[in-house]
Image (cartoon, rainbow, N blue to C red):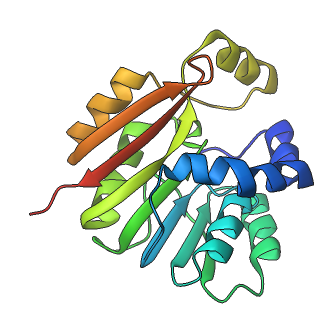
Amino acid sequence: MPAMSAVEAAFCRSAPWRAVARRTILPWALQGVEPYGEVLELGSGSGAMAEGVARSFPSARLTVTDVDLAMVSAAARLLAGLENVRVDRADATALPYPDGSFDLVTSYLMMHHVVDWRRGLEEVARVLRPGGTFVGYDLTDTLIARAVHVVDRSPHLLLRPDDLRRQLRAAGFVGVTVRVGFARTVARFLAHRSAP
């Protein structure tokens, strides 16, 4: 899984992004799901969303990950002092956690950077406990999203909502919902790992 482009990294570390992420985007992305138990955030960037979860849901225990070492360092600095947070470097296609480790997995605007995002969905299903939840949002394959990623040259594979829905089911998820919004540029998803 590649590191972020310089443009995305700067954006993720900005104070305006952190403020908007915590107050507006996080509740919208969680779709009414209240983080509980063991929570894994994939591709956390600088940790803005994780900070919001940690402060709003202090009983949840967060494992915050990113593959980009600079983002891991930025998240560790931002989240230092929060006792319910651990920050790890991890590749979403080869997660270093045992099967069934988490009650909830979140992904906010990062799966399109996992060029093999279908493998990433299989890993999410593997590390979720039966009945666990996977929730988040990502960019869809639109002209504007393609243009942004051509300009910043970051490796990516943009998601098509129907393909995301199919691949979630293929990875073993049930109760799958994928909702498209913001002029069809983003898709929110919510799915559960099937019980044995």
| Residue occupying image coordinates x 30% and y 55% | 125
Looking at the image, which is closer to me, 153 or 131? 131
Determine which quarter of the picture holds residue 112.
top right
Query: Which residue is at the far left?
Result: 196
Residue 115 visible in image: yes
Residue 194, percent from left and from top: 17, 56
Q: Is residue 159 left or right of residue 102?
A: right
How many marks do you count on the picture? 0
Q: Quadrant of the C terminus?
A: bottom left
**Which residue is farthest top?**
143
Q: Residue at x 77, y 87 (%)?
A: 81
Residue pictured at 91% horizontal, 55% vertical: 15
Question: In the rendered view, would you say 188 is above or below 89?
Answer: above
Would you say 146 lies left or right of 41 here?
A: right
Identify the residue at horizontal 34%, vertical 75% (top origin). Answer: 101
Q: Which is more toward the observer, 131 or 80?
A: 131
Residue 59 position in % (x across, y down):
52, 84
The answer to whether residue 158 is seen in the rendering is: no
- State left or right for residue 183 relative to residue 133: right
Instruction: State the residue in front, 29 or 80.
Output: 29
The percent position of residue 173, horizontal first and vertical second, equals 24, 47
Figure quadrant of residue 94: bottom left
Relative to 124, 155 lies left or right: right
